[in-house]
Image (cartoon, rainbow, N blue to C red):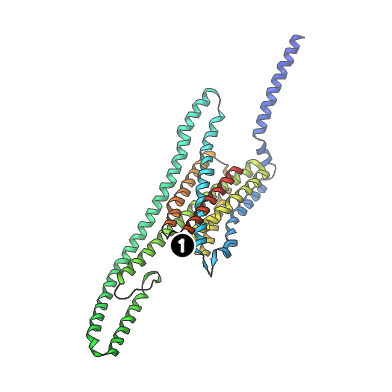
């Protein structure tokens, strides 16, 4: 009887262990089986449809157009506030969402091992996995810096060529102005009629020269042509400088949307329709403020309102490619961590080197400073709230 009891206990213990192991195994793959309940075509249609829905979040900026425009033109104060809000959302998303995910992804894999192997793998993860994520962040910052340098170099060379031609043209007009002044001085003794005629001639020539000034800036009087030319050059250079950060923002946002698309596709693939739809709602809450900020950054960089809406929507559509890739190949957490780190580096660079310095290039007032600080804090708080909810 004792042996029978022992056998029963051993059998019960074995069965319990086997049941627990089976339950653990089943629990680990439960979502996967739920995701496979629908047909592959159904998963593709649901995932791609939700990805398109998230991409449509960029069109929320259409609702803001009546608020942005003031007397037929975009309000500078409102555009600046949106741009700073976008910078805050970028920094918050980088430090509170993407980087914790990137570093956490490498750390979570080390806990899948036990005993001595666990300790070795844990140390190995900190020396390689976390280091690779940090390197991807630095790579994103350096790459954006290189791209900006290349664009500025090309623009400076093209401007120098234009300035050399304009410089010779300027001396040509200067000689005309000198001859006009001599003619004016010579004709002073002829009476008031000749004086007015000479002044009208000079004014006409000065007006014709002003129409060739860059960016439609009116030329100054003939006594001070050089400062106006320098001012026009500075305005053009500043506009081109801002435009660079607009394009960098589009590229970085496209990479970000690609990773969001991958996450959405993986949710439908591994967690079924319930997990996919919950991920869709989270991405909508995440993208709405992000797209508003991106729109403000593009307009502040020099894009027209229509172009900002169009390119922002094109950047959002990149999520479809990420969703398709995730459904085709599945999600690789390691590569996802590297992409998230790279995107965070790009966001940090755009916010710190692009948007925020632009706010200091203009006249600083107490009202504008308070509005910009509130916008920056709101962008960060939105990112914090989304990270806490997730």
- Where's the N terminus, which quadrant? top right
- Depth order, front residue of 187/57: 187
Q: Is residue 134 left or right of residue 260?
A: left
Which residue in the protein does label 1 denote?
Answer: 302
Crowdedness near tag 1: few (<14), some (14–19) or many (≥20) residues, C-alpha within 10 Å: some
Q: Residue at x 52, y 25 (%)?
A: 117
The residue sitting at the top extreme is 2
Q: Residue at x 57, y 60 (%)?
A: 61
Q: Position of residue 131 (x, y in %)?
A: 45, 36
Image mark count: 1
Q: Position of residue 365 (x, y in %)?
A: 45, 59
Q: Residue at x 24, y 90 (%)?
A: 190
Q: Position of residue 214 (x, y in %)?
A: 37, 70
Is the residue 294 above or below the residue 207 in the image? Answer: above
The local secondary structure at tag 1 comes to loop
Q: Is residue 198 left or right of residue 385?
A: left
* One can see residue 116 in this view: yes
- Depth order, front residue of 378/14: 378
Is the residue 327 above or below the residue 126 in the image? Answer: below
- Depth order, front residue of 382/149: 382
- Where's the C terminus, which quadrant? top right
The residue sitting at the front extreme is 366
Q: Residue at x 49, y 32 (%)?
A: 125
Is the residue 210 above or below the residue 95 in the image? Answer: below
Please identify the quarter of the rendering in which residue 266 is found.
top right
Q: Position of residue 30 (x, y in %)?
A: 67, 36
* One can see residue 390 in this view: no
């Amino acid at each position: 009887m004792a042996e029978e009891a022992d056998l029963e206990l051993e059998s019960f213990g074995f069965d319990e262990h086997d049941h627990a192991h089976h339950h653990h195994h089943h629990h680990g793959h439960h979502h996967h089986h739920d995701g496979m309940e629908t047909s592959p075509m159904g998963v593709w249609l649901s995932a791609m449809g939700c990805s398109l829905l998230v991409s449509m979040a960029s069109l929320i900026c259409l609702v803001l157009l009546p608020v942005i425009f003031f007397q037929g033109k975009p309000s500078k104060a409102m555009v600046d506030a949106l741009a700073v809000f976008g910078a805050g959302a970028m920094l918050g998303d980088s430090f509170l969402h993407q980087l914790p995910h990137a570093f956490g992804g490498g750390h979570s894999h080390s806990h899948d091992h036990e005993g001595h192997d666990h300790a070795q793998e844990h140390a190995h993860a900190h020396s390689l996995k976390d280091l690779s994520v940090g390197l991807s962040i630095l790579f994103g910052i350096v790459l954006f810096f290189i791209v900006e340098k290349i664009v500025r170099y090309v623009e400076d060379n093209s401007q120098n060529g234009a300035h050399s031609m304009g410089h010779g043209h300027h001396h040509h007009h200067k000689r005309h102005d000198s001859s006009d002044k001599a003619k004016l001085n010579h004709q002073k003794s002829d009476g008031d009629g000749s004086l007015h005629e000479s002044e009208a001639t000079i004014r006409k020539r000065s007006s014709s020269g002003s129409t060739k000034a860059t960016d439609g800036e009116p030329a100054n009087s003939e006594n001070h042509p050089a400062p106006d030319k320098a001012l026009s050059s500075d305005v053009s250079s500043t506009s081109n400088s801002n435009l660079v950060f607009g394009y960098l923002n589009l590229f970085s946002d496209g990479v970000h949307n690609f990773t969001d698309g991958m996450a959405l596709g993986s949710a439908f693939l591994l967690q079924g329709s319930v997990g996919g739809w919950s991920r869709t709602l989270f991405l909508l809450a995440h993208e709405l403020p992000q797209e508003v900020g991106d729109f403000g950054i593009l307009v502040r960089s020099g894009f027209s309102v229509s172009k900002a809406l169009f390119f922002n929507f094109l950047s959002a559509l990149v999520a479809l490619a990420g969703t398709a890739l995730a459904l085709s190949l599945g999600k690789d957490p390691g590569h996802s961590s590297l992409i998230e780190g790279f995107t965070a580096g790009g966001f940090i660079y755009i916010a710190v080197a692009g948007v925020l310095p632009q706010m200091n290039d203009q006249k600083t007032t107490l009202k504008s400073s308070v509005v910009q600080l509130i916008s920056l804090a709101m962008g960060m708080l939105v990112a914090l709230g989304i990270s806490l909810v997730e």
